[in-house]
Amino acid sequence: MSTDTAVQSEVDVPHYAMYIGGEWVDAAERYEIRSPATERLIATVARGDLSSADRAVAAAKAAHEDGGWRSTPPAQRAQVLRTVADRFAERTYELAALHAEEIGATLRVAEPFHFGAALPHMHYLADLTARYEFESGGPTVHPVLAAGKVRREPIGVCAAIVPWNIPLPLSVWKVFPALGAGNTVVIKPDEHAPLLLLELAREFEAAGLPAGVFNVVTGEGEIVGARLADHPDVRKIGFTGSTAVGKEIMRRAAGNVKRLTLELGGKGANLVLPDANLEEAVDGSLFAFLMHSGQGCESGTRLLLPDALHDEFVARMIERVKTLRFGDPMDYDTDLGPVFSAAQRDRVLDYIRIGQDEGATLAYGGGVPTGPGLDKGFWVEPTIFTDVTNDMRIAREEIFGPVVSVIRYRTIPEAIAIANDSDYGLSAGVWSTDPALAFEVAEQLEAGMVWINDWHLAPPEYPFGGVKQSGLGREAGPHALDEYTEPKFISFDLSGGLDGKPYGLLLSTPAS
Ligand code: NAD
């Protein structure tokens, strides 16, 4: 792999600089980006700092004030977004492979799903930009005003802060509507998973996006991320990450009342109803908690089973999970890849110990797999806990690994109550052969997204996001640009004489 954003470093892997103000800007220090499966060095990346964050915000502010991008007609802005989407589509295999290697997702899933899911979103958000109603209004029913309009104006400098688990789609959901609406953007990827976003910068540059409109700063969260959250010239933050950091960003954003969209953690409740198709529900429930080794905010990690099905369901799940193959994520035959890092593996193993200490039954897994190809990298077995109660930490806290907590229920209202008894409310799922019943249950679940007989689906036409401590606002869907515009009301008073005007309520016609 070689890129013209990069020079070959001394260890013969590409080195990526930051993209700031239309230039590739290096730093004195570097991060190593290593494959979570093999620990192989893939690339090095500039280690940005406070001054990089400030420089990027200054570039984005200058580009906003210059006005070139925001006054570019939406159809032309949409065309730039479309060009980038087309380039990503042309480079699908190469970029999906880079993405899979960087984050450890299996290529079989990453190509159509993680990476692949970003492409329709790019095209949808480009098309949405072209048809978005940036101006609306007309005559009013107000007794005085004759005409008013609402202009949806860009907010200004928008910062995007994203995590490592699926950086491309999570960034597209922020960057495309922000740019489509005429804002300028500074994005801070996770310092260990920035490569796709630097490739995105490369394609924006090639598509002719003016300097300073899109900037990428690679650096630590507590340094670069915190600076963006504090910065008085940043007007909006789109953040995806943990609930704890989301709260910290909210506190910092209060300084200048920044607009916020927050996509935070989850503890998805997966309700198998008594009439579910067992075979589908077993496979689907594995998909819900095992995709990307459970490192998805929307994963279904609390599995609610009716008493009558419980034992058979768990037995079938264990038989099925035994057939899954660990291995090289770049091999299309691999079912399960690694977790992202040593720290993530240790965190998951800690939770497995906590579950056992709390009295849950470790029905399957719980360890680190061994075998050919697993001597390097960060691995955790798929882990199934039974006899879990909803007050246990393994039922309440986000583990972010391949672990499911199985909770029994007796009646459907009880299952709904357990599902809703959570600080989180991002996703939920229902398995049933009765559509009317499934919808009735789905409507009672406190979650931003409920899947019936499937999981993880995020089509571009529908909003993504959570309720309660899973977040604030929504990404994607028809209102995606609303989150990146400020509605401004402008009225034009055509009412004529003084008495007909609002100020005529205060002032009377002067005596002649
Ligand atoms: P994290 O919160 O630790 O980090 C997310 C981003 O914030 C990173 O870029 C990090 O560098 C930055 N950051 C860290 N500390 C910061 C600070 N003090 N100020 C500003 N920025 C800071 O999350 P993570 O471990 O990288 O990702 C996993 C979390 O992300 C999980 O909780 C998961 O549920 C969540 N997530 C949510 C969604 C969603 O759409 N709701 C999607 C994916 C991941």
Image (cartoon, grey):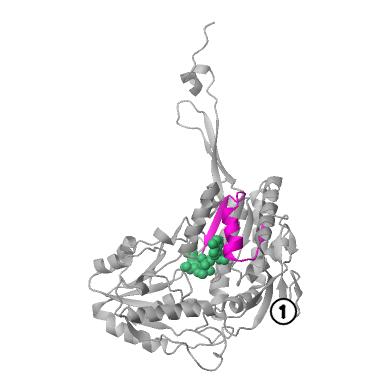
Residue 490 location (% of width, % of height): 56, 35
Residue at 64% across / 76% down in the picture? 33
| Disc 1: residue Cβ within 8 A of ligand 1's nearest atom | no
Quadrant assignment for the N terminus? bottom right
- Nearer-the-camera pick, 120 or 271: 271
Residue at 52% across / 77% down in the picture? 343
Residue 508 vs 31, above or below: the answer is above
365 magenta-colored: no
* Left or right position of 82 against 6: left
Residue at 67% across / 71% down in the picture? 90
As helix, strand or loop, the secondary structure at mark 1 comes to: loop
Amino acid type, callout 1: Val
Quadrant assignment for the C terminus? top right
Q: Which residue is mark 1?
A: 13
For label 1, count other residues whose C-alpha is less than 10 Å away and answer few (under 14), some (14-19) or many (20+). Answer: some
Residue 405 vs 251, above or below: the answer is below
Question: Which image quadrant for residue 94?
Answer: bottom right
Residue 476 location (% of width, % of height): 52, 59
Which region shows up in magenta?
Answer: 214-240
- Nearer-the-camera pick, 142 or 64: 64
Residue 202 vs 388, above or below: the answer is above
- Nearer-the-camera pick, 97 or 461: 97
